[in-house]
Image: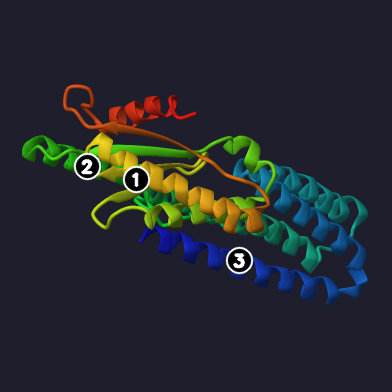
Amino acid sequence: MKRYQSSLMSDAAFLLLFVLCFVHILFTAGDPNHYLINMILLNVSFLIAIITYFTGLTAGLILNIVFIFGYGTYTIYQTVIVGQPLQAYNYYWLVMTPLLTAIIALLTFSNRRLQQDADQLQKRNATLATLDERTNLKNSRSFQSDATIFMALSNRYKIPLTLLVMTVKHWDELSRMISEAQMTEMIYDISRMSETSIRLNDSLYMLNAERPTWGLLLFTDQDSAKIVVDRLKEKVESFNTVEFSNKYKLDMKLTIGAAQYTPEEVPTPLDFIAKARQKMEYDV
């Protein structure tokens, strides 16, 4: 409801600004006898509006007070000392300049409200998102939720559970050799390759999208997980000779660490990841 009100307020302010600009043009063009003074006052009016847009309503109010005092003093001087009668444009600019400032302030306020709402929605989506946007794999938030359940099942029914953590060796150097679009495509290709190398009841996660790190939860012991590790590395070797070499003009190797779940050593999902990362140090 608040977002709708902010949007409606922004639309109304923009429409009022458009109408007021049209009125300014008609008034200035319709009084050729005072064209020069009207053009000067029109520029002053827009200058105050622009300053209000970039600084805020307080600065706009101060400038309008200065304008009204200055222009009012000039008008009184022209009327009392010079003897020039009051004209329509004298009243017009004293009213329309503050009105234009008020409309700009309303437009600025509503746009900021919309930006704040957009930022809140973005933060909420980031908090609630469970899929990586580039690969559609489950992310680290989803991993922590699933791993907690799998760890409880493993502990209760004595089912072996192993986590594989996988990264691309020398990723920082490789990422400098290809474009960002190719980098995203490479991450997708590796993810697709990993999905074809595991069973249907195993789960693949994107643990870190910035420096691509995958996690695979396998219902098997650490010795049997070596079969999956070997299968992944064989797949990479075959990709290097065919797909990756032709597509990206470089060779890729994986660094994989495997850790089996034990309640004493792995109390939380994050500890599970940390233990698997330690095992990666031995994969050289």
Mark 1: amino acid: Val
Contact between marks 2 and 1 (CB within 8 A): the answer is yes
The colour scheme used here is rainbow
Disc marking residue 14: 3
- Mark 3, other Cα within 10 Å: few <14 / some 14–19 / many ≥20: some
Residue 27 point in image, percent of width and height: 78, 73
Looking at the image, residue 182 sits to the left or right of residue 47; the answer is left
In the rendered view, would you say 241 is above or below 148?
A: below
- Mark 2, other Cα within 10 Å: few <14 / some 14–19 / many ≥20: some
Q: Nearer the viewer, residue 184 or 70?
A: 184
Mark 2: amino acid: Thr
> Which mark is first along the chain, 1 or 2?
2
Mark 2 lies on a secondary structure that is loop
Image quarter of the N terminus: bottom left
Q: Nearer the viewer, residue 269 or 256?
A: 256
Q: Name the residue carrying label 2.
A: 220
